[in-house]
Image (spheres, rainbow, N blue to C red):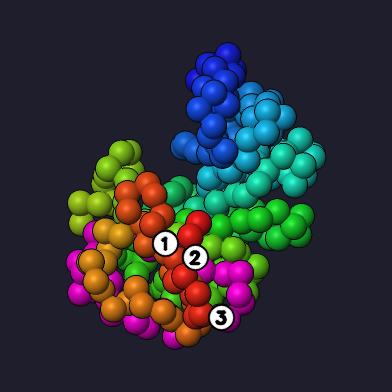
Amino acid sequence: MSAKAFADVVTWCLRHHVGEITFLGGEPSLHPAFPEMVALAHSQGLAVRVVTNGARRFRRLVESGLIGRCNLNRVAVSLDTLDETLQDAFRGRGAWQDAMDTIRLLRDRSILFDINVTGVRPVLDGIGALIQFANEAGCRRVNVHWPSSIGLGAQLAVDHIPDREEWHGLVLMATKRVGTRPDFFVEIERGFLGEGDPLWMTSPICRYSRMAGPIAAGCWSTKTAWHR
């Protein structure tokens, strides 16, 4: 995408009262005009969200001050597992260290961040520990979603999509390991769980939101229902 094409997208967003714009990829920070695009979107009043693998270029841009609390509203770091070997097998050599270094940087710079998890079978047993790590690291949200049907995700999806029974057992286990920080919640895409599932009921220790396609229909916490 050219910088001009992106400027047209921003104009369209403003015309149609869009409040937030998300940069994703691939790795969006590899675009040569990425910091200028972020600055443009922010200057026009759009909230800016970035989904990143934690690339070194992304960290350099944060460290330089070109992007950061001044123009980023939130960042989602792709981290599927605490197992370095498994993460690198999915996303390339050094991916685990990149994600960890980026999480530390975001935390140190007080930039709001989430962790995105692709819910393939090999990572399921470790998601409870990953949720606990996210809570302790100051993460705002853990989002567990289906594998993409595009690119590497398509290869992962062939053999590794969990069935419903596996996911049920995992969630029951994981909820017991989540911390009690009031601003931390776990978001699970609706495809993993069925309508009327008791796991969507109030949890004493964690918030959940139901995803209906691209729209979060609602969230449940210990005392009150609320909407994103």
Q: Is residue 187 magenta?
A: yes
For the residue carrying disc 1, how many other residues have a C-alpha within 10 Å: few (<14), some (14-19), or many (20+)?
some
Tag 3: amino acid: Gly
**Amino acid type at image mark 1:** Gly
Q: Which residue is mark 1?
A: 218
Precedes in sequence: disc 1 or disc 3:
3
Q: Residue at x 56, y 39 (%)?
A: 20
Q: Quick one: SS at disc 1?
A: strand
Kind of residue at badge 2: Trp
Q: Answer whether residue 82 is visible to the viewer in this image.
A: no
The number of numbered discs placed on residues in the rendered structure image is: 3
Instruction: Tell which circle, 1 or 2, labels the residue nearer the N-terminal end.
Output: 1
Asked whether the beta carbons under mark 1 and mark 2 sit within 8 Å of each other, the answer is yes
Q: Which is nearer the N-term, disc 3 or disc 2? A: 3
Query: What x and y, as percent, mark residue 179?
Result: 56, 80
Asked whether 188 or 137 is in front, the reply is 188
**Please, is residue 11 above or below residue 175 in the view?**
above
Q: In the visual, does 210 lie left or right of 82? A: left
Magenta segment boundaries in residue numbering: 160-189
For the residues marked 3 and 2, what is the alpha-carbon distance in whole angstroms?
Answer: 20 Å
Which mark is on residue 226?
Answer: 2
User: What residue sits right under mark 3 in the picture?
Assistant: 179
The image position of residue 155, as x and y in percent, is 26, 46
Residue visible at 45% across and 48% down?
Answer: 92
Q: In the image, 1: left or right of 149?
A: right
Residue occupying image coordinates x 58% and y 43%: 49
Whole-angstrom CA distance, mark 1 to mark 3, is 21 Å
